[in-house]
Image (spheres, rainbow, N blue to C red):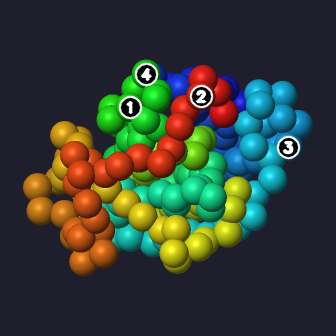
Amino acid sequence: MDIRETAIPGCYELTPPVFRDERGLFVKTFHEEVFARHNLATRYAEEYYSLSGANVLRGLHFQLPPKDHVKLVTCVAGEVFDVVLDLRADSPTYGRFETFSLSDGRANMLYIPAGLAHGFCVTAAPALMLYKVTSVYSPEHDAGIRWDSAGIPWPIDRPVVSARDAGFVPLSAFESPFRYGGGD
């Protein structure tokens, strides 16, 4: 597995080998020893998936402390324009975002540390996203940043956005409880 740190400290793009033959493909998305060797979380509390149609935009989501979590995401069908936004107040990349293309063909994943908001929009539908998180979903700690408030160059003009996501605070009004501290 190729593990590459992104421009945002603690955030990694992981690309596992993809084994293809006449039947299709096979991908190992998690290996405890490999993750541990790279100081990545190995204990996940929940796993879930979302299925999204054309022009759907989800995000930018996170959980507040003390229920914040590391997130491992991958697109197992279709393709998405994926985004992380650094919300850690003392991070050298606070308020900056990075974008990625996640797709079933590449089988690449993002390892997203606590304190980063995450979102995506569908670029090849339907898109099936798989998530692993290190803490259980907590409705009272569920939060987000409005998708259009951080200068992200979304590749679609009129996204399908939920009322919940449209109602999040803009980045400029967010008071971050997250701290970077130089490591994860």
Q: Residue at x 70, y 56 (%)?
A: 134
Q: Looking at this view, is 159 or 145 the one in front?
A: 145
Q: Looking at this view, is 50 or 116 the one in front?
A: 116
Residue picked out by circle 1: 94
In the displayed structure, 97 sits above or below 45; it is above
Residue picked out by circle 3: 32
* SS at mark 4 in the image: loop
Label 2 neighbour load within 10 Å: few <14, some 14-19, many 20+? few
- Name the front one of labels 2 and 3: 2
Say what amino acid the circle numbered 4 marks: Pro
Label 3 neighbour load within 10 Å: few <14, some 14-19, many 20+? few
- Name the front one of labels 2 and 1: 2
* SS at mark 1 in the image: loop
* SS at mark 3 in the image: helix
Q: Whole-percent x and y of residue 136?
A: 67, 69
Instruction: Residue lying at the far left in this picture: please name it.
Output: 157
- Give how far apart the Cα atoms at labels 2 and 4 are: 10 Å
Q: Residue at x 75, y 64 (%)?
A: 45
Tag shown at residue 181? 2
Q: Whole-percent x and y of residue 159?
A: 19, 63
Say what amino acid the circle numbered 3 marks: Glu
Say what amino acid the circle numbered 2 marks: Gly
Q: Which residue is drawn at 48% across and 57% down?
A: 62
Dot placed on the residue nearer the N-terminal end, 3 or 1: 3
Label 1 neighbour load within 10 Å: few <14, some 14-19, many 20+? some
Residue picked out by circle 4: 92
